[in-house]
Image (cartoon, rainbow, N blue to C red):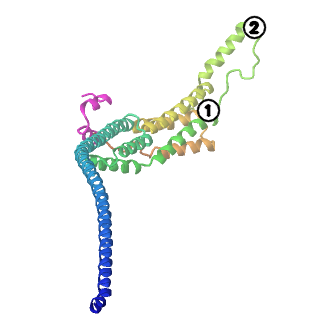
Amino acid sequence: MATFNTNTPSRGNNRTALIAVGIIALLGLAYALLRVDILRARIATLQGVTHTLEETDQHLRTQVDELLKTQQKNNVQLDQLLAQVGAIHDQIGGLREGATAAKQQWARIEALYLLRLAQEQLSIGHDITNATKTLTAALTALGNDNATADVQRQLAQHLQQLHALPTALYTQTEQQLQQAADAVMQLPLRIHATGYPDEGEPLPESGIDQKWLKLRRALHSLFSIREDAAPALSQGAQVLGQSQLRTLLKQAAWAVRTQDQASYIAMLKQAQVTLPIVLDTQHAGVRSVQNQLQQLLTLTIAPELPNLEHSIAALERGVPRTATNTSGKQP
């Protein structure tokens, strides 16, 4: 019995230990169950999130597919637009080339008209100054047209020829003749050796006698004889001769402008013959005019002018026939 009592506390301790272990096991089981519930909740949450993500991913995939399709359509449209832009660019290039060609063509037509005008100014009007301006305008109109380079070189040579002409001398000569024409009207007439018949005699009161005296004086005014036996015009005829001399000098000035060498020489020679008949050659002004006329006779007022017909013909070959006819040239 003593032995039995000795083992009793030991058994109690074991039982206590077993209970404690059981409690701990229960607590561990409860904790495990709690953890499982937590994990299950997390798994459910993750499954929900995963499902949401899958739906989102599917939605995104759908949007991506739509974007890809849209991008493909946009690429097709972009290619079409690029093709259209290329076609428009080609059309613009063609229009630009056509506009350039039309501009050059119009410039040639304008230059052709100006060349014809310059030719008329030279051949008909002998207007060197305006012909030079017109020819310069024609050369400017052609610009940088390489197709008309030969014509432009010809025009440049014609301009050099015109610039080399002594136009200032021609203008000065014309002015000198105009001034001389105005001056002769102020110069003294040739002196008469004899006066009118019955000069100083008062007119009679009788109408018949008065008319007879006037008639004799009028007849004598037409022609008088100098003491040196040289024929001399009467004063009235000298006044007319003075006007004729002025006209001759005016015509000589016009011959300078029109570059009519034959008329120029003829007018000056006639003026040389007329001057001593009607003017007093003892007067210094008259002698000055005589010397001036002698000097002017030595001038050549009709220089050789350039002929533009070759340049006109060369330019016509590059101008349409209708444009040539429209500008006034007959076919």
Could you say where residue 267 lies in the image, as x and y percent from the top left? Answer: 46, 35
Q: Is residue 321 magenta?
A: yes
Q: What is the quadrant of the C terminus in the image?
A: top left
For residue 178, what is the image quadrant?
top right
Of the residues under marks 1 and 2, which one precedes in the sequence?
2
Q: Is residue 212 left or right of residue 136?
A: right
Residue 188, above or below 73: above
Dot label at residue 206? 2
Q: What is the quadrant of the N terminus in the image?
A: bottom left
Instruction: Find the magenta span and give its range.
Output: 311-331
The three-letter code of the residue at mark 1 reads Glu
Q: Nearer the viewer, residue 26 or 174?
A: 26
- Residue on which the image places disc 1: 227
Task: Say which element carries label 2.
Answer: loop
The three-letter code of the residue at mark 2 reads Ser
Could you say where residue 164 lies in the image, as x and y percent from the top left? Answer: 40, 51
Residue drawn 62% across and 43% down? 285
